[in-house]
Image: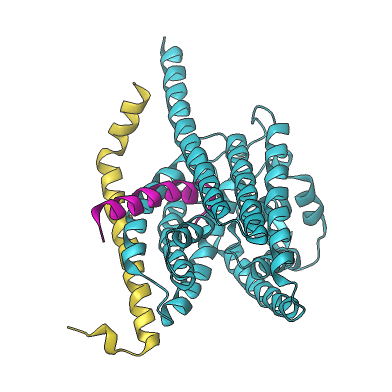
Chain colours: A yellow, B cyan
């Protein structure tokens, strides 16, 4: 396990931004998969209500 | 962190995500004031706001890329020109600070610029009437119709100083004009201390003549870099709080997906009206806050925040409502044709 607090400020900042970037990519893929799975059904439901 | 605060951040992120995905802007000028009013130190409010904008712009850019709405060549040129402009803008601010005039000049410029662009965009959109002059959102690579290019952009495109650059949508502009527009928007961005999406997106459309969906996608691409560098610099000073950024991002990722998809459904004339109205709301909010600062009325800060959040809620609600209405109208037309 890497102790982030012991890293120099530049590496700590890089790790923080890396976490944000990782979450962004995971959310993009995750929500993308959800959109593929239920997006069309949701649009059809909106059209028909 | 309490569950209520977590839900608040996710909900707030959802709201901002819709605006960000739809307009390619609206992140930092919404998040930072909200965090300040909630009592976070300015360093954390600005740093976390930037980190959030970075994450959201990554997601929104990927989505716009899927729709073919990012011009990378234009984006890289804009980054180069904007970076130079920001440096000059910062120097002007430092000089004005020495003269003791920075605060008031920046505030007045901000209100007039935000309000001016808001009035101009709303006027142009309303003048366009029924939106027939809009660009087809599904055909980002198609040749743009000459009637869809604003007059100022036509003039700028007429200066054929080599080398000429061909952009997405078949737009041909001199490299120097692109760098000039990028420098000017960067100058304002550095001078006002803002991300600059609300300046760059209309500049790409009104000055260079890039179709609105590509202007939004390319602007987001640029924000990935400016937001990334800005948040990295703040993170080095401990200004990025992940307990704020992560829930905000979880909400905004979903909102950005809805907002980006809405650009392909909603009429372009409506996009411009919403954009203009949100800028006007922002301008009034900043003016109220400045009046509060000058006369020492702290409650004006809260009024300003309510105005910003209110206009954001109203506009994102209108985007979702228009999308739902457009989908239902499309369904009704389809049924009528079959009949």
Nearest to the observer: residue B305 or residue B232: B305
Q: Is residue B4 magenta?
A: yes
Left or right of B42, for residue B292? right
Q: Is residue B108 magenta?
A: no
Looking at the image, the residue that sits furthest to the left is: A1
Left or right of B119, for residue A26? left
**Considering the image in quadrants, where does the N terminus of chain B appear?**
bottom left
Q: In which image quadrant can residue B72 be found? A: bottom right
Q: Locate residue B125, reporting x and y percent.
A: 68, 36
Q: How many marks?
A: 0
User: Above or below — where is B242 with respect to B313?
Assistant: below
**Considering the image in quadrants, where does the C terminus of chain B appear?**
top left
Looking at the image, the residue that sits furthest to the top is: B339
The prevailing secondary structure element of the residues shown in magenta is helix
Looking at the image, the residue that sits furthest to the front is: B296
Left or right of B46, for residue B126? right
From where the camera sits, is residue B197 visible? yes
Q: Locate residue B131, reporting x and y percent.
A: 64, 31
User: Above or below — where is B276 with respect to B208?
Assistant: above
From where the camera sits, is residue B149 visible? no
**Rendered residue at 72%/63% (across/down):** B181
Nearest to the observer: residue B147 or residue B5: B5
Q: In which image quadrant can residue B96 be found? A: bottom right
Q: Locate residue B55, reporting x and y percent.
A: 40, 63
**Rendered residue at 66%/66% (across/down):** B192
Tell me which segment is drawn in magenta.
Answer: B1-27
User: Above or below — where is B85 with respect to B64?
Assistant: below
**Rendered residue at 73%/32% (across/down):** B127
Q: Locate residue B81, reporting x and y percent.
A: 67, 71
């Amino acid at each position: 396990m890497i102790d982030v607090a012991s890293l120099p400020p530049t590496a700590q900042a890089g790790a923080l931004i890396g976490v944000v970037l990782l979450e962004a990519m995971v959310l993009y893929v995750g929500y993308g998969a959800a959109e593929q799975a239920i997006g069309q059904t949701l649009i059809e439901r909106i059209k028909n209500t | 962190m309490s569950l209520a605060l977590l839900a608040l951040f996710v909900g707030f992120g959802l709201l901002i995500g819709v605006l960000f995905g739809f307009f390619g802007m609206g992140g930092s000028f919404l998040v930072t004031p909200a965090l300040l009013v909630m009592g976070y130190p300015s360093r954390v409010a600005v740093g976390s706001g930037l980190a959030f904008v970075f994450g959201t712009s990554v997601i929104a850019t990927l989505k716009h890329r899927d729709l073919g709405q990012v011009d990378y060549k234009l984006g890289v040129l804009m980054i180069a020109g904007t970076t130079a402009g920001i440096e000059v803008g910062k120097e002007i601010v430092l000089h004005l600070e020495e003269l003791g005039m920075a605060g008031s000049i920046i505030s007045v410029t901000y209100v007039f610029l935000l309000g001016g662009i808001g009035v101009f965009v709303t006027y142009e959109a309303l003048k366009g009437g029924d939106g027939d002059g809009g660009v087809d959102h599904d055909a980002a690579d198609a040749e743009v119709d000459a009637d869809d290019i604003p007059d100022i952009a036509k003039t700028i495109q007429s200066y054929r100083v080599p080398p000429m650059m061909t952009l997405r949508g078949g737009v041909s502009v001199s490299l120097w004009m692109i760098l000039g527009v990028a420098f000017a928007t960067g100058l304002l961005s550095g001078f006002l201390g803002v991300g600059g999406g609300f300046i760059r997106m209309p500049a790409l459309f009104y000055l260079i003549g890039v179709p609105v969906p590509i202007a939004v996608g390319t602007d987001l691409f640029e924000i990935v870099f400016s937001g990334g560098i800005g948040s990295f610099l703040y993170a080095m000073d401990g200004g990025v709080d992940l307990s704020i950024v992560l829930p905000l991002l979880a909400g905004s990722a979903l909102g950005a997906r809805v907002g980006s998809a809405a650009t392909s459904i909603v009429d372009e004339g409506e996009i411009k009206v919403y954009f203009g109205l949100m800028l006007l709301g922002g301008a009034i909010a900043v003016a109220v806050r400045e009046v509060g600062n000058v006369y020492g009325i702290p409650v004006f800060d809260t009024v300003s925040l309510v105005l910003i959040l209110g206009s954001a809620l109203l506009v994102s609600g209108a985007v979702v409502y228009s999308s739902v209405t457009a989908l239902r109208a499309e369904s009704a037309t389809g049924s009528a044709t079959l009949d």
